[in-house]
Amino acid sequence: MKKLISNPEAHYHPQKRPSGHEISKSFAKDNGGAIPSNLLQIPNTDSNGPYLSTCKALGLKGHPARFPSQLPEFFIRFLTEPNDVVLDIFAGSNMTGAVAEVEKRQWLAFELQKDYLATSVFRFVPNVLPLENKKQIYEQIMLDIGVDLTKVQTQGTSLSLWRDEIQ
């Protein structure tokens, strides 16, 4: 864009595009910024993070299609403001919910497979929480007993649990 603005005649020829959209010479105007590039170069190299290492340590299968936090972070920051609601209808390991939490967004996550939903809790508990406590939280979720993560202690074995009555 900077190259285009510096010398529009050399880098841009206004004409009708194949889509039928006609872009004029005003396209080369400096508006003080541009929409970020549509190419996101983000490596997917996290094979030892807290989520997957906890799954492995407990002998549980982590979600096979995990993606790096930078992907939902880009869209959450670009498209929402703090306190907005982020919806993920295919949550998987719930990386989107974890990033939304960090970015101070409300979030809703849906996942068809209960075991993926239950292991996604590892993204929200303190990494220093003993492995036995993490396993207990996972098991409680698998038994349809909710866990109030705001009251999870990082030491000891007490957990605050709540049960949703399923109609």
Image: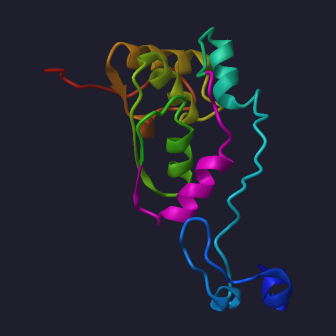
Residue bounds of the magenta highlight? 64-86
Q: Quick check: 22 above or below 130? A: below
Residue 72 sits inside the magenta stretch = yes
Q: Residue at x 18, y 22 (%)?
A: 165
Q: Is residue 61 left or right of residue 28?
A: left
- Residue 46 at x, y = what percent? 76, 33
Spot occupied by residue 58 in the image (x, y as percentages of width and height): 62, 11
Q: Is 57 in the magenta? A: no
- Say which quarter of the image contains residue 26: bottom right
Examine the rendered structure and indicate whether residue 3 appears above or below residue 141: below
Instruction: Classify residue 117 as left or right of residue 42.
Output: left
Residue sticking out furthest to the top? 59
Q: Quadrant of the N terminus?
A: bottom right
Closer to the camera in the image, 92 or 139: 92
**The C terminus appears in which quarter of the rendering?**
top left
Residue 148 at least partly seen: yes
Determine if residue 31 is in view: no
Residue 154: where, in percent of width, then height? Answer: 57, 32
Residue 9 in the image: above or below residue 162:
below
Q: Which colour assignment does the render follow?
A: rainbow
Q: How many marks?
A: 0
In the picture as drawn, the residue positioned furthest to the left comes out as 167
Q: Is residue 78 left or right of residue 27?
A: left
In terms of image quadrants, where is residue 159?
top left
Vertical placement of residue 4 versus 147, above or below: below
Q: Which residue is drawn at the image coordinates 64% and 48% (left, top)? A: 71
Q: Residue at x 43, y 19 (%)?
A: 113
The residue lying at 39 percent from left, 23 percent from top is 112
User: Residue 4, image x and y in percent?
Assistant: 80, 83
